[in-house]
Amino acid sequence: MLRLGIISDTHGLLRPEAVRSLTGVDHILHAGDIGRPEIVEQLRLIAPITAIRGNIDTADWAKAYPETDTVHLEGRTFFLVHDVHDLTIDPAKAGIDVVISGHSHRARVETVDGVLYLNPGSAGPRRFKLPITLATLDISSGTLSPVIHDLGSG
């Protein structure tokens, strides 16, 4: 089994609850709006990380991160894009198994045309009254098992 940690919209804040929820994952995918380079450095202490930049990631340090990325893990293909509305490919036709996005600050787990769309919500500063969340995704025997984790009232 492989366990992925999926996080987005940290906006420069890595909560202790997020660190606890991600401890023990095999790889972390960050779907943008990182906020500060230290966030990726701190996450890298937990597990290898693949990160993309989001719309707030405009400083020079953020140019090191692509706007989208494709990752192959455990025989599955993951496509990271910050805002799912910016998708310029047809994931099903492109052989993508999972689209990871952020931006909306709203968690989403939905399968469309055989593609899992996973938005972990926002793990950073609270926006409006939306919950503070991240996700894990277990891959076992070819099965994808996503779980949204509520990080509390923070």
Image (cartoon, rainbow, N blue to C red):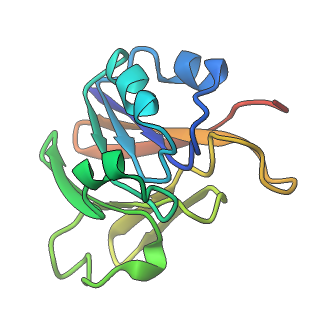
Q: State the image coordinates of residue 77 (x, y, percent, origin top left).
A: 18, 56
In screen coordinates, is 73 left or right of 152?
left
- Spot occupied by residue 70 in the image (x, y as percentages of width and height): 19, 58
- Residue at 61% x, 52% y is 121
At a point 57% along the width and 38% down the height, the residue shown is 12
> At 15% from the left edge and 76% from the top edge, which residue is drawn?
94
State the image quarter where residue 10 is shown: top right
Q: Relative to 82, does residue 63 appear above or below in the rendering?
A: above
Q: Nearer the viewer, residue 104 or 117?
A: 104
Which quarter of the rendering shows the C terminus? top right
Q: Residue 91's x, y, as percent?
A: 26, 76
Q: Position of residue 9 (x, y in %)?
A: 56, 49
From the viewer's perspective, tell me whether residue 38 is left or right of residue 113: right
- Left or right of 81 on screen, residue 126: right
Of residue 30 and residue 115, the one placed in the foreground of this image is 30
- Note whether 102 is above or below 151 in the view shown: below
Quadrant in the picture for the N terminus: top left
**Residue at (45% x, 73% y) in the render:** 84
Question: Total of numbered circles in the picture?
Answer: 0
Asked if residue 149 is positioned above or below residue 119 in the image, the reply reads above
